[in-house]
Image (cartoon, rainbow, N blue to C red):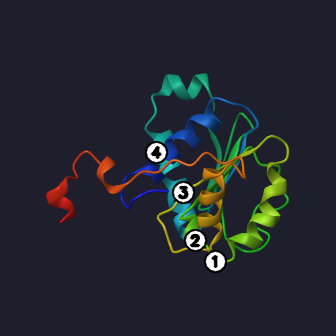
Amino acid sequence: LKSRQLGISTLSAGYITWFVLFRESKFVAIVANKRDVAANVLKKIKTIIKRLPDWMIKATASVETDNAYAISLTNESWVKACSTTGDAARSEGLSLLVIDEAAHVEGLDELWTGLYPTLSTGGRCIALSTPNGVGNWFHKTCTDSETGLNNFNLTTLPWDVHPERDEAWYK
């Protein structure tokens, strides 16, 4: 649960990059309120990989396939930006599912029903979002995690965690 413009999507892209470069056969799906938002996270991952030193790429993995919505690596890991249709990443055995702007994904309750089983092989989920009212999947997941009704670990990042934001900025 985060404030806007904190760089958390970029931080997540860095984590995903580390996850797929330094581990073999990891499968990551990024879902967002719009496929282009998910593709933007993928674009950040590609930028990070391109800017890594050559020695690091040689020691880990390099990009094998690269298109607008997916990359695969020579270590058999891949990252895919998915749409929010009912069958998004449904047939995949995911190592990591990232849901960006989760409170703004319409029909995430139904989508989660299809996505959750893809994590059954030990996969994990990171759901990021600014708030968007009550009653949606993200709100319910956050409140359930506070009371121990699910396995999510809630992290709350208010506007003032940004080092350049103070009371004057807020006003």
Real-space Cα separation, disc 1 to disc 3, in angstroms: 15 Å
Q: Which residue is mark 1?
A: 106
Q: Secondary structure at mark 2?
A: loop
Instruction: Count residues near mark 4 (Cα–Cα under 10 Å), then give few for <14, some for 14-19, many for 20+.
Output: some
Q: Nearer the viewer, mark 1 or mark 4?
A: 1
Name the kind of residue labelled 1 in the image.
Answer: Glu
SS at badge 3: loop
Q: Is residue 47 left or right of residue 127?
A: left
Inter-mark Cα distance, 2 to 1: 7 Å
If you read the primary sequence from the N terminus, does the residue marked by circle 1 or circle 4 appear first? 4
Q: Position of residue 70 (x, y in %)?
A: 65, 56
Marks 2 and 4, the one that precedes in the sequence: 4
Q: Earlier in the sequence, mark 2 or mark 3?
A: 2
Q: CA distance from mark 1 to mark 4?
A: 24 Å
- Residue at the disc numbered 4: 11
Q: Which of the 4 image quarters holds residue 116?
A: bottom right
What mark, if any, has residue 128 been given in the picture? 3
Which residue appears at 37% of the width and 54% of the height?
Answer: 158
Q: Is 148 left, or right, of 18 in this rendering?
A: right
**Depicted 152 relative to depicted 54: above or below:** below
